[in-house]
Image (cartoon, rainbow, N blue to C red):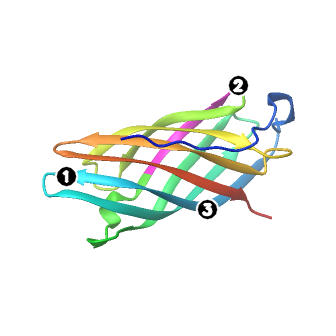
């Protein structure tokens, strides 16, 4: 399984260096466990501190298409900003899975952030992507 994020990447020189911003959007992917697979969706958000070169990634309201509400699969973690992109480690709310998340800034002046996530745990995997837009 795999996921990808596409867009017009923000040039490194155009990524802000001293402000903060909140980005909100959606995440989606595939959740696989010993029972089978299910399509997951969630609300996604990033709180970015361009001056500190860090971001906090989180999802909430995670839902499985066949399995319903799955708050235990909400994700969170800290990302570092480098070379116009973001990367870091994340875990599910119940700590049953952990993995990585990455992303890129898109648009003029870094108006959007999109990327992928990949988590693994005991007998389960979740992989997908997210897209967010800078909030006013």
Tag 3 residue? 25
Q: Would residue 80 appear left or right of 106 to someone viewing this image?
A: left
Tag 2 residue? 83
Image spot of residue 83 (x, y percent): 70, 25
63 shown above or below 90: below
Q: Quadrant of residue 39?
A: bottom left
- For the point 69% across and 33% down, the residue is 53
Q: Would residue 25 appear left or right of 126 to someone viewing this image?
A: right
The segment highlighted magenta reads 76-83
Q: Would residue 36 appear left or right of 107 to someone viewing this image?
A: left
Give the tally of numbered discs. Answer: 3
Tag 1 residue? 33
10 Å crowding of disc 2: few (<14), some (14-19), many (20+): few
Question: Separation of disc 1 and disc 2 at Cα?
Answer: 35 Å
The numbered disc on residue 43 is: none
State the quadrant of the N terminus: top left
The overriding secondary structure of the stretch rendered in magenta is: strand
């Amino acid at each position: 399984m795999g996921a990808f994020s596409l867009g017009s990447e923000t040039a490194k020189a155009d990524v802000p260096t001293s402000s903060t911003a909140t980005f909100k959007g959606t995440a989606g992917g595939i959740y696989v466990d010993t029972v089978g697979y299910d399509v997951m969706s969630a609300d996604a958000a990033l709180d970015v501190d361009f001056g500190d070169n860090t971001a906090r990634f989180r999802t909430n309201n995670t839902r499985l298409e066949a399995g319903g509400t799955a708050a235990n699969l909400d994700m969170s973690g800290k990302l570092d900003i480098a070379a116009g992109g973001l990367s870091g480690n994340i875990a599910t709310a119940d700590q049953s899975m952990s993995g990585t998340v990455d992303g890129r800034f898109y648009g003029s002046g870094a108006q959007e952030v999109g990327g992928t996530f990949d988590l693994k745990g005991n007998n389960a995997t979740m992989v997908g992507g997210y897209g967010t837009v800078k909030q006013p």
